[in-house]
Image (cartoon, rainbow, N blue to C red):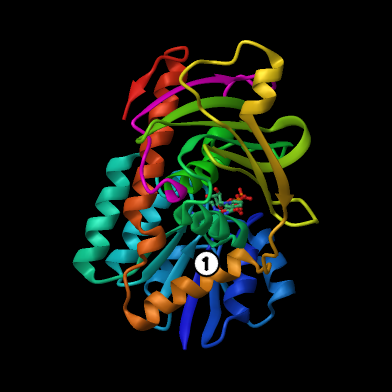
Amino acid sequence: MINVGIIGCGHWGPNHIRIFSQLPNTCSLMCADLEPKRLGFVKSLFPDIQTTQDYKEMLTNADIDAVCIASPTKTHYEIALQALAQGKHVLCEKPLTLKPEESLKLKDFAEEKGLVLMVGHIFLFNSGIRWLKEYIKSGALGQVYYAYATRTNLGPFRYDVNALWDLAPHDISIFNYLFDSCPTTVAATGHKFIGDTHDDVTFATLSYPNNIAANVHVSWLDPKKVRQMTIVGDQQMVVWDDLDNLGPIKVYDKHVEKTSTYYETYGEFQLLSREGSITIPKIASSEPLKAQGQYFINCVEENQYPALTDAQKGMEVVRVLCAIDESVKNKGACINI
Ligand SMILES: NC(=O)c1ccc[n+]([C@@H]2O[C@H](COP(=O)([O-])OP(=O)(O)OC[C@H]3O[C@@H](n4cnc5c(N)ncnc54)[C@H](O)[C@@H]3O)[C@@H](O)[C@H]2O)c1
């Protein structure tokens, strides 16, 4: 039995408590939050769980094997460091830390102690994204030209980080995973429309190796909740829409034949563009948070390295976020990563 302690019981933490209560050979033994009200709420849902306002009490509890950190981003580094020092395996919510150096320190420390340290890049456990990865790998899309991601909604607004740090870790981790690489440059603009401390909207352009251009649009100030990504290849194009009831993936069998001379008339263009069918592949749906929790527990139980979402991958996302911040501060300047 793996006993897990959950630190941070705000909006997201109770979901982790539920998952670790449902997985086989796993127990949500304890949870911590600074706010007694949040602990009371969790206790009403999970009457057997032990609660504390001081997460350090959890770290010195010998019955706890692993902790899941779901507190605000600025607390991740310190809590993860202390948890590892006390010999606990760690699953930490995204983004792993506020600085890439901190992520690297955690990575080295976990390796030195022989502990699992994993970051919650939840979309790498999303069945649509997994399918997309295999599809790109199969070569069916051909050479990827460009991709763009849209992650918008009206709120919820956060006070600890801006929309970029809240939402873009998802899209950057997905792009890094799909393209098996990290961007080499970024250029971005950020915009404060509601408050004067945090950007509500960010547009970021990322350049990946192999000439792949990518764009991320995140916003808390939008009429529509959108979770979409489009990948355009030289043979086919794919749209991933996590909220589409018909299925998360649509494959467009469309492309444009490249010729040595460019078309001069609309008729010529029609001959060059190849219009095929649109396919919606059948993809079994599963709860990504559960798959992520199971992966973490398997790594702990079998003493395996969490290669899919290790601290190195967490650090790579944080490095991109910092570069985007720098570009935003410099009014969209191109920043080398
Ligand atoms: N993977 C996802 O899809 C997803 C979704 C939402 C949030 N998150 C991540 O989860 C984390 C938490 O987000 P949230 O929306 O639940 O935030 P939240 O503000 O709703 O909750 C954070 C909770 O942590 C508590 N807290 C703060 N400092 C603490 C400390 N030192 N010890 C114990 N508790 C402490 C707060 O009292 C609060 O209840 C963030 O890192 C966020 O990025 C991930």
Residue displayed at 47% across by 72% down: 295
* Farthest residue, direction left: 112
Amino acid carrying label 1: it is Gln
Callout 1: helix, strand or loop? helix
State left or right for residue 85 relative to residue 20.
left
Please identify the quarter of the rendering in which residue 280 is found.
bottom right
Instruction: Provide the residue span drawn in magenta.
Output: 177-199
Residue 31's place in the image compared with 158, above or below, is below
> What residue is at 30 percent from the left and 70 percent from the top?
115
Q: Position of residue 251 (x, y in %)?
A: 66, 49
- In the rendered image, residue 330, in percent from the top left (x then y), is placed at 42, 13
Q: Give the mark count.
A: 1
Determine whether 53 is above or below 88 in the image.
Answer: above
On whether residue 181 falls in the magenta region, the answer is yes
Identify residue for label 1. Answer: 292
Q: Nearer the viewer, residue 15 or 245?
A: 245
101 left or right, relative to 18:
left
Of the 4 image quadrants, the one containing the C terminus is: top left
Residue 299: where, in percent of width, then height? 38, 75
Q: Main secondary structure of the magenta part?
A: loop
Residue 8 visible, this angle: no
